[in-house]
Amino acid sequence: MTDTTVSVKGTILLDLVKQVRKAKDLDWGDYLRPEDWEIIDGEIMATAWYADDFFYRISLAVYKVIGESKLEACFAYGNLLAYSMAEVYKNIVVPGDPATSIERFIVRRRSFFKGEYPDAEKNYFEQETGRVMFRIYVDTKVRGEEVAQVIINSILGTMHELAKITGGGDVKSNMEDHHDYFDLTVTWT
């Protein structure tokens, strides 16, 4: 019998949990379960593993309650996450080389999941001078289209900001939704 449980590393939960803690007075009832509050009120360890269901619920909750269902908020969250990632995982950032930095982020991102998810993920990454494209396949039937959009926009925001952090000028980003996969493109001068 194979273990189909998927877990996420605490690293990607820390900022989400902080946002919920700062806004505890808001109405989270439609999105978070009582068992989620046990995790939120506890100590989140960056190196510990947590159920992926909690990650998807808290991501959607922050998007709905704090981000007011605006995908721009997810992109902005990704921008902030780029700085956290650069601080914690210093080897991601290659000054003057946005493409390598973004590729390292994509590789590191994969290590934040364990179980069936990383083994099943078949993404595609291409780079050329002043441009990267990351194709990420998403099973929207499992998590839903809305959660997929939240996660994808956050990833694109991180890629975009990493290009800026590492010296890219006039950074632009674009997402194309192909329903079972997304193409995330970042360009810079």
Image: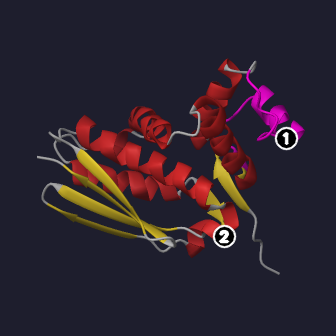
- Where's residue 30, x and y in %? 80, 40
Q: Which labelled disc corresponds to residue 33?
A: 1
Q: Which colour scheme is used?
A: secondary structure
Camera-side residue of 176 and 9: 176
Residue in the picture at 67% in, 50% down: 56
- Where's residue 10, x and y in %? 64, 41
At label 2, the amino acid type is Lys
Q: Is residue 188 above or below residue 119?
A: above
Neighbor class of circle 1 (other Cα within 10 Å; few <14, some 14-19, many 20+) is few
In this image, 162 relative to 116: left or right?
Answer: left
- Where's residue 82, x and y in %? 40, 38
Residue in the picture at 75% in, 18% down: 25
Q: Give the range drawn in magenta.
A: 26-50
- Where's residue 84, x and y in %? 45, 33
Neighbor class of circle 2 (other Cα within 10 Å; few <14, some 14-19, many 20+) is few
Residue of label 2 = 141
